[in-house]
């Protein structure tokens, strides 16, 4: 098994961000607690990601404070709203607002930061195709980012975020590797897609073979995945995935090709290519959809739905679209 350094240029893990927010709120409510402050400093020094998450939480709190101060009467309004509440209750209310604001801001900031610092990246709705120096064809789906590490000893694609489609040939000089948060994949003369979600990575092999290397497998052996097979990979396991009801690599041609796909799942896929909210009411979530849909204009794509299903598309704003049962 080829070893690869697990140190990547990911942003702080969401769990680390939550810890940073928790420390900030605890210190805000216990400013005189020297021991608590020392514990926080020890946590910050334990890992680079801890300090990064801490600095971003602090930056947001300063930003919120400055914006609030700039609003005429805002301080008075807050004081009035807090009348009748104990100091602790008022602080809990304000801390809850800060918690939600911090989580949203940090998540948004990390996406932009990864796009600027990664070797290759795409924005929402964008797709990109690149031929690497060794002849490998690398295609990035919407809102994806990768780092590349190619040298005499290895060919490594680090999938920071999103989904890629890789077409590679046999090369005896060094294996072609794809690294995600959940596993390490070795492509062997074929075509395969790797999609990284929050809880797992999905591997789909179109042609050729791919080896899944996991340091946590009990037998220490690699899992061999062949053409037509799909796997869900987590740090602790690699298991066969249920058959997909959409073509794996159709997005590379600007298409979504479905076969009896749930409407809710279909909208989830389309939503990856546009900003804002896109969803449907629970009563029509199980409707099934088959067809070939073009991704170049998702508004035109959505306009086709009422022609094939008993639904209507309602735009509350350009960025808030719901599909509902037709009247």
Image (tube, helix red, strand yellow):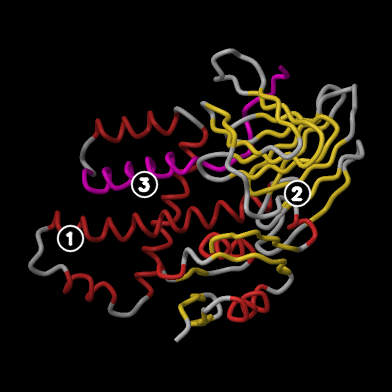
Q: Which residue is mark 2?
A: 120
x, y (%) of residue 23?
32, 41
Q: What is the number of the mark on residue 21?
A: 3
Q: Secondary structure at mark 1?
A: helix
What residue is at 39 percent from the left and 60 percent from the top? Answer: 101
Q: Is residue 295 visible?
A: no
Badge 3 vs badge 2, beta-carbon distance below 8 Å = no
The quadrant of the picture occupied by the C terminus is bottom left
Tell me which numbered mark, 2 or 1, is placed earlier along the sequence: 1
State the image quarter where residue 267 is shown: bottom right
Region rendered in magenta: 1-30
What residue is at 65 percent from the left and 78 percent from the top? Answer: 304
The quadrant of the picture occupied by the N terminus is top right
Q: Is 202 placed left or right of 77 in the picture? A: right
x, y (%) of residue 200?
55, 39
Residue density around tag 2, few if under 14, some if 14–19, many if 20 or more, within 10 Å: some
**What is the C-alpha distance between the residues marked 2 and 1?**
46 Å
Residue density around tag 1, few if under 14, some if 14–19, many if 20 or more, within 10 Å: some
Looking at the picture, tell me which residue is in the foreground, 56 or 322.
322
Q: Is 304 placed left or right of 92 in the picture? A: right
x, y (%) of residue 216?
55, 20
Residue density around tag 3, few if under 14, some if 14–19, many if 20 or more, within 10 Å: many
Q: Residue furthest left?
A: 84
Tell me which numbered mark, 3 or 1, is placed earlier along the sequence: 3
Q: Secondary structure at mark 2?
A: strand
Q: Is 44 placed left or right of 301 in the picture? A: left
Q: What is the number of the mark on residue 90?
A: 1
**What is the C-alpha distance between the residues marked 3 and 2?**
30 Å
Q: Is residue 170 visible?
A: yes
State the image quarter where residue 261 is shown: bottom right
Q: Residue furthest top?
A: 219
């Amino acid at each position: 098994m080829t070893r690869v350094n697990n140190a990547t240029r990911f942003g702080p893990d969401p769990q680390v961000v939550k810890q940073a927010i928790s420390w900030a709120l605890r210190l805000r409510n216990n400013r005189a607690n020297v021991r608590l402050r020392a514990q926080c400093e020890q946590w910050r020094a334990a890992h680079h990601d801890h300090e990064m998450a801490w600095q971003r939480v602090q930056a947001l709190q300063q930003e919120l404070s400055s914006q609030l101060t700039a609003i005429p009467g805002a301080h008075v309004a807050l004081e009035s709203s807090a009348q009748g509440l104990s100091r602790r209750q008022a602080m809990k209310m304000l801390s809850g607002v800060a918690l939600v604001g911090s989580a949203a801001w940090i998540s948004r900031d990390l996406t932009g930061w990864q796009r600027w610092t990664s070797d290759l990246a795409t924005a929402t709705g964008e797709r990109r195709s690149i031929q690497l120096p060794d002849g490998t064809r690398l295609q990035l789906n919407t809102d994806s980012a990768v780092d590349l590490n190619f040298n005499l000893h290895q060919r490594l694609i680090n999938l920071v975020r999103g989904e890629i489609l890789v077409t590679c040939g046999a090369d005896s000089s060094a294996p072609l590797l794809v690294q995600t948060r959940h596993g390490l994949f070795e492509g062997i003369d074929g075509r395969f897609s790797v999609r990284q979600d929050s809880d797992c990575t999905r591997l789909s092999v179109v042609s050729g073979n791919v080896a899944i290397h996991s340091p946590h497998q009990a037998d220490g052996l690699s899992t061999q995945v062949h053409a037509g097979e799909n796997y869900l990979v987590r740090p602790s396991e690699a298991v066969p995935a249920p058959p997909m009801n959409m073509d794996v690599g159709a997005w590379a041609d600007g298409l979504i090709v479905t076969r009896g796909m749930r409407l809710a799942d279909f909208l989830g896929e389309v939503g990856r290519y546009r900003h804002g909210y896109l969803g449907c009411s629970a009563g029509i979530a199980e409707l099934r959809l088959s067809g070939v849909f073009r991704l170049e204009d998702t508004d035109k794509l959505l306009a086709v739905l009422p022609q094939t299903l008993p639904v209507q598309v309602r735009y509350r704003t350009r960025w808030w679209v719901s599909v509902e049962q037709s009247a």
